[in-house]
Image (spheres, rainbow, N blue to C red):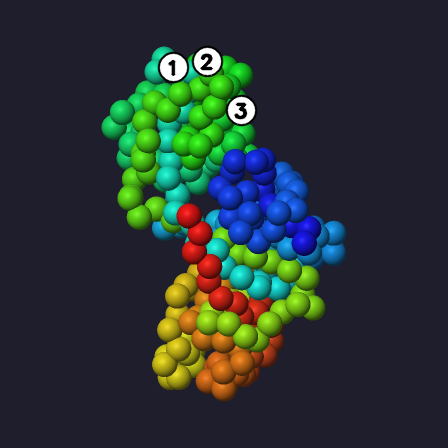
Amino acid sequence: MRTVTLGPVGSYSYRAASAVSDDIEFCETNPDVVALVADGEYERGVVPVENSIGGSVSETLDALAEHDVAVVGEIVTPIVHALIAQSEDFETVASHEQAIAQCREYLNEHYPDVTREAVSSTTAGVERAAEDSSVAAIAHPDNAEDDLEIIAEGIQDRASNATRFLVVAPAAERSDSGGKTSLVVYPNADYPGLLLELLEPFADRDINLTRVESRPTGERLGDYLFHIDIEAGLYEQRTKEAVADIEAIAEDGWVKKLGSYDTQHVA
């Protein structure tokens, strides 16, 4: 199964994608992953959507709202960060912006004057460190190879650091089966109590919300859509009724059912 994710080999996205397929290819950004699957160029894509420290990955959320794809799985993986460099004498720390955010407290305490440089992936930071002795990387400790050494390990701000990755597929493969469901709701309205109205159908049917997040549509200031994750499958009668209520509330907008899926935990 041809799968695309944010590379290169050794990145956390690659580690998550390895739980889906052995046939993995890479692209430059998470929105590219979603777009390539939507266009039918790959059977699966794996994208990070939320980290327990850094929060949501906004570019992934926006891509899921923009493109017609299905979510067919969720992968949760622990994140263990190490500081990797040629030596302890460095002036810059390079890594993906999420990794830098997840190690902010450590960097503030131990390297407050070091420049922080956001690059496309954790592995890209390792490549920078391998090429330049003045650069250290934040990445999984397994990336310390050749002339690189682990300066410090477990530098993430919380020991429970973990990332949720979503497995996306062509829209035709959307499933109603699974323990979780992701929705995107654009009500195309703005009035007091709107968000409460959108959430009440779930509360009334004892459906647990695992995430609710608003994102600007980009069309005009103050225009928002909502990403909603619930602990229920679309096959369930209570979910069907709740979604029908939301579709009625958002009759001037739209409701996108990304699909139902199960969760896989990988090391």
On the question of residue 114 being in view, the answer is yes
Residue drawn where x is 60% and y is 76% of the image: 252
Q: Residue at x 35, y 16 (%)?
A: 88
Query: Is 158 situated left or right of 267 in this image?
Result: left
Residue, disc 3: 127
Residue extending furthest front?
22
The amino acid on which the numbered mark 2 sits, given as a three-letter code, is Ser
Q: Amino acid at mark 3?
A: Glu
Secondary structure at badge 2 equals loop
Residue 18 in the image: state x and y as whole percent.
55, 47
Counting residues from the start of the chain, the first of labels 2 and 3 encountered is 3
Q: The N terminus appears in which quarter of the rendering?
A: bottom right
Q: Is residue 159 or residue 205 the one in the foreground?
A: 159
Identified at 46% across, 72% down, the residue is 179
Q: Do the CB atoms of the residues marked 2 and 1 lie less than 8 Å apart?
A: yes
Q: Give the number of callouts.
A: 3
157 left or right, relative to 171: left
Cα separation between marks 2 and 1: 7 Å
Residue under numbered circle 1: 87
Residue 186 seen in the figure: no
In the displayed structure, 171 sits above or below 204; it is: above
Q: Position of residue 50 (x, y in %)?
A: 44, 52
Q: Looking at this view, is 73 or 214 the one in front?
A: 73
Secondary structure at badge 1 equals loop
- Above or below: residue 158 compared with residue 124: below
State whether residue 262 is above or below residue 119: below
**Residue 253 versus residue 112 in the image, above or below:** below
Residue 154: name its quadrant: top left
